[in-house]
Image (spheres, rainbow, N blue to C red):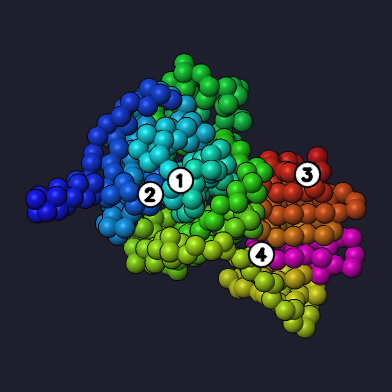
Amino acid sequence: MKFFVGFFIFLRVLCASEQTETFVAEPIFNASVYIKTVGNPEKPAIVFVHGLGDEASTIWEQSISLLKENYFVVTFDLPGFGKSSKANELYSPQNYAKVVRFLTQTYVKKPFHLVGHSMGGAIALKYAHMYQEDVESLVLVSAAGILHKFAYGKSLAHNGINRFFDEKNGFIQGLQTQKLNNFIDKITDKIDNKITLDIDRVLLSEDLRGVVLGGTPHTIAAVALVQENFNGIPQTINTKTTIIWGEEDGVAPLQTGYVLEKLMPNATLKIIPRSGHVPMLTHEEAFSHWLLEHLNTKTIFAKKVPKKETDAYHIKMKNVKDKIYTGNIATMTVRDSQKVVIKDATIGELAIFDSDVEIINSTIRGQKELILTVQNSSLSIVSSDIVGSIKLNNARLNLAGTTMSSRKKPIEAITPSTVIFSLCTINDKYKHGKEVFGR
């Protein structure tokens, strides 16, 4: 008798650990969704959300093998991708989050670890904002679409559109998944300049999605992703979060990772050297290390303690390229230089002429109200704090995850200059958008 009882228990455990693949009808898009579960449902649950790639949920196969013994692993093809049904629907991050909620309420029924890659990272961020009580912890891998759409340039075309618009007439030509190009700049500029329809109106209309976006799921999902506004959302998510990014990601810019780490109260950023947009495939060992460390660490992450300031120094540079500066910079003048990076620094006063500069994780605060002058240059300020004002002259300024306070006008321009705000706080007000100053 004991033998049969023991054998019965063994069978229950064996069955509970089996892989299950099925299709389920979901109520958001009325789609048939392919879903796979692996492991014992009694164990902690981990849910993976894929991005825009044709691979869909197969991108997580190596992670499933890593975790299946100790976790109940759930993957699925989002509607419009992989084996799931495809239609002309509004495939937005918010709607996808509702699909994920239906699937997890049906198959998981308890708090779970949520992992999202690329567009899936944006969906996971949206989900954690909408249903924070469901999420035990959060992992964002190369999350795309978080910054303002004009901030991306070449940063969102992996598995996207090779020639989204025909240069002559502005109509969509089709979907290709092999090349990376100026997708975001093309879609935003061409929509603004050549298509009189409001893109949000296009997304909400089945007929317009068919005419303007071809009714193609990949295209609709990509456009809806860059239209989604995440302003103010990262700050609301208190869940323990690990942000994993490839150092050489050419699809979703690494600056997004810095921004999320700064804005999310309990987040930490892990950068994988020499990795691109899909570290779970190209750098499996490093990715698995950070994923397991996240799952095995129960404590909330502590924010980094600012480094002790060193003696201040002054610097003037000209014809410099690919150089990084850090530390306590009293004054800096940059002329005719490219790819200059200022990182983990305190800056008193900065003037930039005919150059390309990026500032990351820094504080800009001087004794004068005017602390930044930018002329005939491109400047990105990422995950930083500014106290003072900026004067622009024929410049392009990209502010991402940056807080700025000024007694006067924060930004003034002598000649027309473009400023892109992504998830910024300017004089205690959220700012997310594109503006042209000085015209």
Q: Which element carries disc 4, helix, strand or loop?
A: loop
Please tell me which residue is depicted at 23% across the width and 46% down the height of the picture.
Answer: 16
Q: Which residue is drawn at 85% across and 67% down?
A: 366
Q: What element carries label 2?
A: strand
Q: Where is residue 57 in the image (x, y as percent from the top left)?
A: 32, 44
Q: Residue 45 carries which label?
A: 2
Evaluate if marks 1 and 4 touch, with contact meaning CB atoms under 8 Å apart: no
Residue under circle 1? 111
Confirm or deny contact between disc 2 and disc 3 (CB under 8 A).
Answer: no
Q: Distance between the residues labelled 1 and 3?
A: 33 Å
| Residue at the spot of label 4 | 361
Residue 250 circle label: none
Residue 267: percent from the left, percent from the top?
Answer: 57, 58
Q: What is the magenta range?
A: 348-373
Q: Which of marks 4 and 2 is nearer the N terminus?
A: 2
Q: Is mark 3 on a helix, strand or loop?
A: strand
Residue 429: image tag: 3
**Residue 123 rendering spot, x and y as whole percentages:** 49, 41
Asked if the stretch drawn in magenta spans residue 393, the answer is: no
Callout 2 touching callout 1 (CB < 8 Å): yes
